[in-house]
Amino acid sequence: MRQIFILVIVLMANCSSEAQSISWQEMAPGVWKGVVGKPESYDLLQASGATPNREAISHMGKAVFPLAVEDISGMVSDGKTYLRFPLDKAEQIYGFGLNFQTVQQRGKILELHVDNFAGKDNGRTHAPTPFYVSSKGYGVFINAARYIKVWAGTAVLRDSKHPPEPKDRNLDKTWTSRPYSDGVEILVPAAGAEVYLFAGPKPLDAVARFNLWNGGGCLPPRWGLGFTQRVQRLYDADMVKKEADDFESKGYPLDFIGLEPGWQSKSYPCTFEWDPKRFPAPAAFVKDMLDRHIRLNLWTNPYVSPESSIYSGIKPYTASHTVWVGAVPDLSMESARKIFFGQLKKSQVDIGISGYKFDEVDGGDSYLWPDVAIFPSGHSAEQMRQTYGLLAMRCSMDMFRQSNRRTFGLVRANNGGGVSFPYVIYNDYYNHEDFITALINSGFSGVLWTPEVRASKTAEEWLRRFQSNIFSPLAMINAWSSGTKPWTFPEVAEQVRQLALLRMQMMPYWYSEFARYHFMGIPPFRAMNLEEGFGDGTQKQNNMAGLETNPYEEAVIKEVKDQYMAGQYLLVAPMFIGQTSRKVILPKGNWFDFYTGSFAGNGTVITVTPGLDKIPVYVKDGGIIPMMKPRLHAPAIGEKMDLEIRYYGTKPGHYLLYDDDGETFNYEKGEYSFREITITPGASGKPVCTISAPVPGKPNTIGDVRWIFPGHE
């Protein structure tokens, strides 16, 4: 039996504070839990119901405690918990939630507060996950459902172990108003907190352990990785059918359509009942769409109209304050959940609805419940604000689990603990560059983000947005307001169609990468700083003259927020409106052009001019990209797919191709397999390729296999 590793730190506090101790206990290999004071019983992990994947963590192997124990401190004072973690001079940190404008977080002061993003990275965001990752290869998670304040290397302790040098502003030109700080300090407004440390040795290992401790990433159904169109808010059944027909006739892929507020009889607040005029026969309508291979996703928010049939029953389990005059269900209470999700299941899920878009569960202080609101569960308004998105996702996923059907949807809020939920965050912001920064940061925060496409002023902008949307967790046009279609700009309509078909072709790759997220904790979309061979953000000790002679070293220590890794092998470098060329930082190791297979570079900065039609994408040496034939809909459950497996470079390649039935939760019962693909250079110059045989008794959706070698003669 594995020994339990326990460290105890006894902290001396001043007379106004309560002396406390942090007890560290190893919960799994490389995962330690520390307790300060008396943590609240309602926290992020409790709200989300996250269950650690201990087996997967064990497979990562043992690790040592990642920090010097004596350098970690904590105490409870004035009913609040104070935490401090060491920070080396050359260390960079990442994370603290879904930030939109910055990747490097050292030097930031934040209040981690669930809210809609208002244009500034200050901690108020859709997923303010209290988790950060160090360039030294460890992670820290604060498991508290509170508005957490963070000083990420900004506050200078009087008795600091590594104090900054005092400087004279009068005469010293190097004086700064922000002197060096050697710590990350965190304030939790509660008389105790639960803290987790995740070991590396590499930053990606710490991220993977965090994800696995939170249950592992979500595994969407195959159709969730296809293409989706959200229609205008007052569409009726006939208009939705015509939308599907138009996609089919024009040759554009489509797997699910999102219905906006007009599907309900009333919204803002909501009735959660079909509008009898726009959708007079919901069950027949849903069946007709499923027969066309189109799933339906329904917009809603959880605020109950007084005219809803469930209002009187759920009212005793709602908050003291309303949202848009709608009652706010206390989703932490079983009685409220039973009524609310019972209505959704009976009138929607049971007739074949495939998913939801949970809107307005994040914030907007002007309309959401105030912090003085009272919830019948006894949980504070603050705690409910921090966890409401978690509760909506958890309960809806359980609803689909009862039918043994996977779902994939949209949500406006997430937090620590929500890694395993099959929901992608979106918002009302619309800056393309910031959308890519958010996609990068999502990999540090245990969430998914879509750089959705809505509308554009020009064909160039439309195509550029569409390109990066295809290389993201959810390929979607959100036309609830604009009414745009993929072919809205005729001059680029064919390029958009080919991109959408490429999304479908790459489904075997995307599906396998999400399986890695689920079983191994590796984010399918992540920052360059997590890539082997790339600079980790550590401040190099070179002088400026040295940097000027090494542009690659200079590039990798800077904040990289316009390129990212997509899956195991792909590097994506989006183009933005007005750009005809851009610089791309290629990590060490050979990299090849995704489209041609030609050599692109090795540990260098290149300038590319791809033209309007292409988004720059590169494949690392030995990269294997499994693809299928272009098609308009995801494969049906159990349907076999012929594969085209592409191999790049000359290094021996290895890939685990995931397979299951594509739609049910049967994979949780072991009904899945990883087919091993290996490719090695042959003596004659032609690569030798193998794929392991199907596993007896497991789903097998792989048909004929064709091998492609881009760039090889």
Image (cartoon, helix red, strand yellow):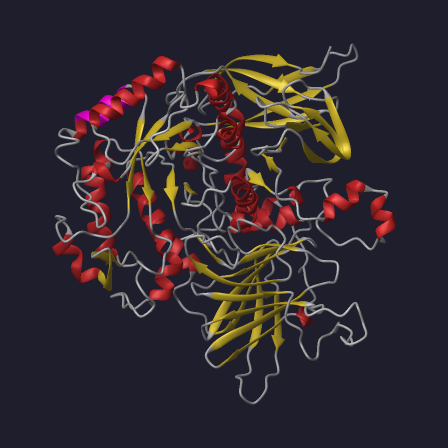
Q: Of residues 89 and 233, which is closer to you in this image?
A: 233
**From the image, which quarter does the N terminus lie in?**
bottom right
Q: Is residue 287 left or right of residue 513?
A: left
Q: Of residues 602 and 677, which is closer to you in this image?
A: 602
Q: Is residue 541 left or right of residue 406?
A: right
Provide residue 585's location: percent of width, then percent of height. 71, 37
Whether residue 511 is visible here, answered yes or no, is no
The residue located at (78%, 9%) in the rendering is 684
* Majority SS type along the magenta span: helix
Whether 49 is drawn above or below 523: the answer is: below
Whether residue 278 is visible here, answered yes or no, is yes
Provide residue 497's location: percent of width, then percent of height. 46, 19
Whether 97 is drawn above or below 514: the answer is: below
The residue located at (61%, 56%) in the rendering is 105
The residue located at (59%, 27%) in the rendering is 615
- In the picture, residue 236 is in which quadrant? top left
Q: Is residue 135 left or right of residue 577?
A: right
Region of the chain picked out in magenta, as a range:
284-291
- In the picture, residue 288 is in which quadrant? top left
The residue located at (48%, 18%) in the rendering is 491
Whether 345 is drawn above or below 134: the answer is: above
**From the image, which quarter does the C terminus lie in?**
top right
Residue 198 lies in the magenta-colored region: no
Residue 285 lies in the magenta-colored region: yes
Provide residue 644's location: percent of width, then percent of height. 56, 15
Q: Of residues 69 and 158, which is closer to you in this image?
A: 158
Please identify the residue farthest to the bottom as the structure is shown. 15
Whether 605 is drawn above or below 211: the answer is: above
Provide residue 342's location: percent of width, then percent of height. 21, 46
